[in-house]
Image (cartoon, rainbow, N blue to C red):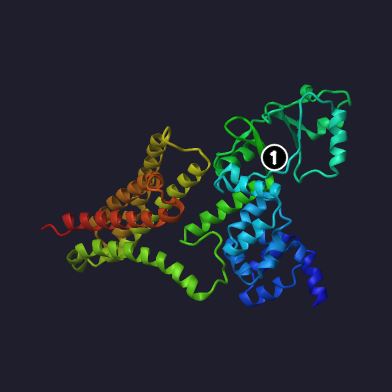
């Protein structure tokens, strides 16, 4: 047991968190009891929200307070809202005034903004001092905050002026003034900037850290690359899980009843769309009864439309997340995707028409499915481009609802086009 505990606690907190999330509830509780109390807070931060809540529920209030008391203010702010209300009160009461102010400062900003991401632990210097003064100041500090690649320069009012890379501080002569080596090109991040834009900024500029300022250019904190990586991973998880109607932090070993309840809501929504498609088919019941070949070929039209629409939808959602598409260029994108849908429709309509004609020995059936396929692929492209923007206006996440709605559109349009054209042409005397 002791050897297992030593092996466990030799891992990084994130690795312990990954292990806990991969264990069923009973084994998870057993392993958590072996975690060193000194790193429990760091492990809790790394856990997904649902797993973290289940672990905290098994802990005593005093144990929770002891686990989180040494966390940085930004980590504490991330964690504190997950705690039971009574524990939150006790935790806040146990903080000194300075730490409490720091946590409240981070909590005052939405968690999906730069203010919610920033940490307050940073090194600031004045522009009118020399490199020698700065070096002596750093030695007195003893250690630097993690991911410190640059020092932030502020005036006497705390306004941001620029940065000085650490390599310049270490390599320039001692009598060099900071104002002579300041890098004013590093633009600060607005405290209200959405986290997705922050992540793009770090990606585009290869940043390790960035200053965060308020509307008066006062330096409030900094964002570091480790927090940005978390944002990127969470966004990727959300996209994957949302496409199936699941939360990005879903516990794979959550209680059966809870998981069933969550998934049943999504299944109910899909059932509604399935009935809608079935209703459209029912409108053409007489046509299908007379021409059985239509029932065989219907899935071809809807399947092709669904795949084409999903390709466009995925492309647009990604482009929207990266800031590559908006009102200024949506028209151009719509024209492009419509043209692709039309060309693909013509190409595969010809292939399907030939196959259907040879299969059922009827050129009219081949012509009907060809026209229906062209119509459905064209509508799929239009829906794939416009749906994300419509859903955003309705404050609905396109990654969550876009796939279901798109499938419904392509199914309904495909059935209507295929069966409608067949009714008008094949059943005419």
- Horizontal and vertical percent position of residue 204: 62, 37
Horizontal side, residue 141 vs residue 376: left or right:
right
Residue at far left of view:
429
- Horizontal and vertical percent position of residue 101: 65, 46
Of residue 105 and residue 190, the one placed in the foreground of this image is: 105
Q: Residue at x 36, y 55 (%)?
A: 405
What element does badge 1 sit on? strand
Q: Which quadrant of the figure contains the C terminus?
A: bottom left
Q: Residue at x 60, y 49 (%)?
A: 231
In the picture of the structure, the residue carrying the numbered disc 1 is 209
Q: Residue at x 51, y 39 (%)?
A: 323
- Horizontal and vertical percent position of residue 38: 77, 63
Horizontal side, residue 166 vs residue 363: left or right:
right
Q: How many marks?
A: 1
Horizontal side, residue 172 vs residue 273: left or right:
right
- Up the image or down, 391 lies above or below 41; here it is above
Q: Residues within 10 Å of mark 1 (few under 14, many from 20)?
A: some
Horizontal side, residue 129 vs residue 108: left or right:
right
- Horizontal and vertical percent position of residue 26: 64, 77
Q: Which quadrant of the figure contains the N terminus?
A: bottom right
| Residue 185 occupies quadrant | top right
Of residue 361 and residue 245, the one placed in the foreground of this image is: 245
Let me know if residue 84 appears in the view: no
Of residue 332 and residue 49, the one placed in the foreground of this image is: 49
Let me know if residue 265 appears in the view: yes
């Amino acid at each position: 047991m002791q050897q297992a505990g030593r092996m466990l606690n030799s891992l990084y907190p994130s690795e312990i968190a990954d292990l806990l999330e991969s264990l069923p509830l009973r084994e998870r509780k057993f392993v958590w009891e072996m975690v060193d109390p000194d790193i429990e807070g760091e492990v809790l931060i790394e856990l997904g929200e649902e797993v973290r809540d289940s672990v905290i529920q098994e802990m005593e209030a005093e144990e929770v307070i002891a686990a989180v008391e040494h966390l940085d203010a930004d980590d504490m702010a991330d964690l504190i809202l997950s705690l039971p209300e009574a524990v939150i009160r006790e935790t806040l009461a146990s903080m000194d005034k300075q730490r409490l102010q720091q946590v409240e400062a981070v909590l005052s900003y939405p968690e999906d903004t730069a203010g919610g991401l920033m940490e307050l632990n940073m090194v600031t210097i004045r522009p009118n001092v020399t490199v020698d003064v700065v070096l002596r100041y750093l030695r007195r500090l003893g250690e630097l905050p993690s991911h410190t690649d640059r020092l932030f320069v502020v005036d006497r009012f705390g306004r941001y002026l620029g940065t000085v890379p650490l390599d310049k501080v270490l390599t320039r002569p001692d009598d060099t003034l900071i104002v002579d080596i300041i890098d004013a090109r590093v633009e600060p991040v607005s405290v209200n900037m959405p986290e997705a834009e922050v992540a793009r900024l770090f990606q585009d500029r290869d940043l390790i850290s960035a200053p965060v300022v308020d509307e008066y250019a006062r330096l409030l904190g900094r964002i570091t690359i480790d927090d940005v990586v978390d944002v990127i991973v969470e966004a990727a998880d959300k996209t994957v899980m949302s496409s199936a109607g699941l939360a990005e932090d879903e516990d794979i070993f959550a209680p059966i009843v809870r998981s069933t309840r969550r998934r049943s809501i999504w299944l109910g929504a899909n059932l509604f769309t399935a009935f809608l498609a079935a209703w459209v088919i029912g409108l053409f019941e007489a046509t299908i009864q007379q021409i059985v070949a239509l029932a065989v070929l219907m899935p071809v039209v809807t399947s092709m439309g669904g795949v084409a629409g999903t390709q466009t939808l995925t492309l647009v959602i990604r482009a929207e997340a990266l800031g590559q598409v908006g009102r200024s260029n949506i028209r151009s994108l719509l024209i492009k995707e419509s043209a692709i849908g039309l060309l693909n429709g013509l190409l595969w309509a010809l292939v399907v028409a030939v196959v259907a004609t040879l299969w059922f020995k009827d050129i009219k059936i081949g012509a009907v499915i060809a026209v229906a396929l062209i119509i459905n692929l064209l509508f799929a492209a239009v829906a794939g481009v416009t749906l994300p923007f419509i859903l955003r206006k309705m404050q609905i996440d396109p990654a969550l609802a876009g796939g279901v709605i798109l499938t419904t559109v392509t199914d309904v349009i495909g059935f209507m086009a295929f069966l409608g054209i067949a009714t008008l042409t094949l059943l005419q005397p």
